[in-house]
Every structure is written in structure tokens, then in C-alpha cells.
Amino acid sequence: MRTVLVLNGPNLNLLGSREPGIYGSATLADVERMCHEEAGGLGLKADFRQSNHEGQLIDWIQEAGLEWTAGRLLGAVLNPGALTHTSLALFDAITATGLPVVELHISNVHAREEVRRHSFVSPAARGIVIGFGVAGYPLAIRGLYDAVRYDEALPTSAIESGS
Ligand code: CA2
């Protein structure tokens, strides 16, 4: 059974306790349950994590790259939190590993402050889910699953040339 990694960045442990108008009232534990349910329905196992530390997220992405290369990991759903808007290191980690990543944001970052409109992660992402609240997590898992199956059905030459 393949695993889908779900990574959450800084302050997402506060979900459900503050700013419900922006992020809703579900807690991160609720989101974890939603991810296990969605993954299970697709025949996957979810590995759900949160860290307030950029280096920890990078270590997890590097480890995930090895698991992905070994065929045990489907890819990752990543909500980088505010690191989205600051971290070239996250971009480098994703690019270096080749790990398929779906970037996810609970809020519609494009409808908020200008600084949230730029993402360092987006150019390295296989897909992006933005603005669906925490319902975006199962959507992102499903999207990653479909995208990877699509990629795996292509001849290797088509993936390497990007066509
Ligand atoms: O919308 C998202 O998912 C964000 O990634 C959340 C980040 C924010 O910096 C990004 O621009 C968009 C913030 C995560 C902090 O989460 C909190 C949750 C509840 C209360 C306070 C913070």
C-alpha cells in the first residue's frame, strides 16, 4: 500500500483555535481524520505531520524523496503556511527530490494581502489547491492521486521532455 505524505507548516497547529473567519473552525486533528478517510478510500495510507520549523519540513521532504524513488510514496500534499511566501529552500528541496507535491492553502491567498500572492513553492508543485477551506485537503489528495496515475501512464520520454 502506497503512502501519501501530508505536511503542514508553521502555525497550522493553531487551526480551529484562532481566526475562524479565515481558516474555519476545524482543528488540525479534524483535518488529519479527513486525510486518513480520503487516503483510505483510494487504497492509500496517509502520513500526516506538522512542524513550525522550516528545516524539519525540508528534512521530511528529502526523506520523502527517497521513499518516492523507492516506490513506497505517492507524493506529498504540502501546506507550507507562511513559508510559502519566503522559502526558496522549500522550492529547492522539492525540485531536488523530484517529489510530486500538491501545494495547498486553506484560504484564498490571492484575495488577501499582496505579500501572500507570491509563492516560492508553486513553480515546483505538480498542482495547487487554494481557497476551499480544509475541504481542500481531501481534494488535494485526490488530485495528487489522479495526477500521479496520469504521469505513470505516460511514456518516460514524454515526462522527461515535459510534453
Ligand atoms: O491559507 C493557508 O492555508 C495558508 O497557508 C495559511 C498560512 C498563511 O501564512 C498562508 O498565507 C496561507 C498561515 C497558517 C497559520 O494558521 C493559522 C490557523 C489558525 C489561526 C492562526 C493561524
Image (tube, rainbow, N blue to C red):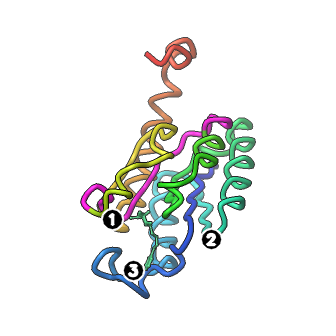
**Residue 83 is inside the magenta segment:** no
Quarter-wise, where is residue 114 in the image?
A: bottom left
| Three-letter code for the amino acid on which mark 1 is drawn | Ser
| Structural distance between the alpha carbons of marks 2 and 3 | 19 Å
Indicate if the residue with disc 3 has its beta carbon within 8 Å of ligand 1. Answer: no
**Dot 2: what SS?**
loop
Q: In the image, is 18 to the left or to the right of 98?
A: left
| Structural distance between the alpha carbons of marks 1 and 3 | 13 Å
Location of mark 3 (residue): 26
The image's mark for residue 9 is none
Rendered view: 15 above or below 119: below
Q: Position of residue 145 (x, y in %)?
A: 47, 43
Q: Nearer the viewer, residue 139 or 108?
A: 108
Q: Quadrant of the C terminus?
A: top left
Location of mark 1 (residue): 107
Indicate if the residue with disc 1 has its beta carbon within 8 Å of ligand 1. Answer: yes
Location of mark 2 (residue): 52
Magenta part of the protein: which range?
95-111
**Label located before the other in sequence (1 or 2):** 2
Q: Residue at x 52, y 38 (%)?
A: 124
Q: Residue at x 51, y 79 (%)?
A: 29
Rendered view: 56 above or below 58: below
* Figure quarter occupied by ligand 1: bottom left
Q: In the image, is 68 to the left or to the right of 20?
A: right
Q: In the image, is 144 to the left or to the right of 88?
A: left
| Three-letter code for the amino acid on which mark 2 is drawn | Asn
